[in-house]
Amino acid sequence: MKRFIKYEYMSSKWMTSGETLKHMLGFKLKLILVALVFGLFLVIGTIVTNHYMLKTSLIEYVDQRDQLHLERIKKNLQHVLTQRGESDLSQMDEVTWKNLVGISSRVDFAETMVPAEVFLFHPFSEFKRFHPNYTEQRLSLMNTGRECIFGNEASNRTLFLPVEIDNEKVGYIGYSHREKLTESLDIQLEQRQRELITYSVAFLVLITGLLLLPIAHYFIHPILAVTQGMRALTAGRFDTRLKVNRRDELGQLLQDFNHLSKSLEKNQQSRNQWIADISHELRTPLTIIRGDIEAMKDGVRPLNQHSLDNLHNEVIHLNRLIDDLYQIALNDVGGLRYQMTRVNFTSLVNNALENFRPQAEAKGLAIHAQLPEQDLFLLGDNDRLHQMIANLIANSIAYTDQPGHIYIKLTQNKKVLHLELEDTAPSVSEEAMKHLFERFYRAEGSRNRRFGGAGIGLALVQQIVHAHQGDVTVSASSHGGLKFYLTLPQEAYAS
């Protein structure tokens, strides 16, 4: 049975409940803290920026309000000058100027029935003289040359509002922009707005922190599931599987874990089967050799040339099996070296056929070869290629019923060599064909162990073909048996 883990962290002998809780809280808290620290920087930046913008906007608002007051002062000044018939601002005394500035915040001379002189000749209090308000402190009366008559000298922040009589400039009212809030109501408004912004941001931070808990849980659970699954794999439990119920990158991570565990499980099964098959294949000839020797020692079987020949044949079979296993093992670890030279492949196939022809004829099989007249070359290992061809022919001879036929055809197309080997009945099922190149696999039925094969000859064929950047496939033959089709590129072959 497969072990499925659906983001659940039950205690096990590779991870206790305390360790699981520690890992869950540790990683989750780190993620939350990182998010909160990052969010804290954003919050601080937001608060500082909002406070600065609030202060600036309030100052601009109050400054614009002061400028509206300034317009009334200008109109009242022009009204007074027109009534007096004056155009020289320097003739105006300081008391009249300050009275005009102070009364303009409440009275528009053009709209009242009270003569302006009534307001202007009203005694100016000593307190206001020495304690003017902030607006009055920033006002100046200047002549046409922008020389100060009353108030402060002009600066680069001074706004000049022209005073005109009959469309002719007679002077300026200077006004310096605000740099800070001075009125108590304005200051209270700014403080209140700052408090509201601060409380709002703090509330948002609290809500964000609470929302981070389920979000962190959502993202961390699959990671911790993979962690627990990896611990299971480390303990040798390759049948562990994780439930996949999401389609994002973490879901892909879970799928990759399941693919890894399946591969490890398959490799473990293959290794176990490999060891069992090797033990069986080595045990069979050793059992025969041991039995023959014990029989000759006990006098059951005579010690003659025939008995020695049988022992010798079993030793050769055992030696061939060990050599094949050694070559497969070397290929697995990358230790099998290929000496690439210019190989006459046509001659190689022809020599192999001639070597196996007597064996085939002795079994009642006829070999039919269709080889090109010209020699075809490729870059390859001569010994490995010879072994590849020999294994294919030996396999057909071993598993073809007599009387039967073996057909071999060699062609060339676009610097690729094509080798076809077909034989007559029996064949194997389509399901069995998928496993013919697996180690120690032998199809049941007609092509079975009665011929004594170890089931690694075709595995070696596939390894050799792949080492030469080629391909090999097997299918049902029109002659009733199997058809092996090989393609070998002639890359960099010597002309």
Image (cartoon, grey):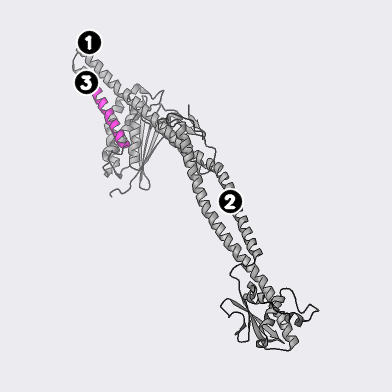
- Between label 1 and label 3, give the one nearer the viewer: 1
- Residue 300 part of the magenta-drawn span: no
Figure check: 265 above or below 79? above
Figure check: 249 above or below 15? below
Marks 3 and 2, how far apart in space? 96 Å
Q: Is residue 121 left or right of residue 57?
A: right
Question: Which range of residues does the magenta coloring cover?
Answer: 312-334
| Mark 2 closeness class: few <14, some 14–19, many ≥20 residues within 10 Å | some
What secondary structure is the stretch in magenta mostly built from? helix
Judged from the image, the secondary structure of the residue bearing numbered disc 1 is loop
Q: Position of residue 251 (x, y in %)?
A: 51, 40
Q: Amino acid at mark 1?
A: Val
Q: Position of residue 219 (x, y in %)?
A: 52, 42
The reply to whether discs 3 and 2 touch (Cβ–Cβ < 8 Å) is no
State the residue position of label 2.
202
- Tell me if I can see residue 325 in this picture: yes
Marks 1 and 3, how far apart in space? 17 Å
Of pointers 1 and 2, the one earlier in the residue sequence: 2
Q: Is residue 231 left or right of residue 336?
A: right
What's the mark number on residue 232?
none
State the residue position of label 1.
300
Judged from the image, the secondary structure of the residue bearing numbered disc 3 is helix
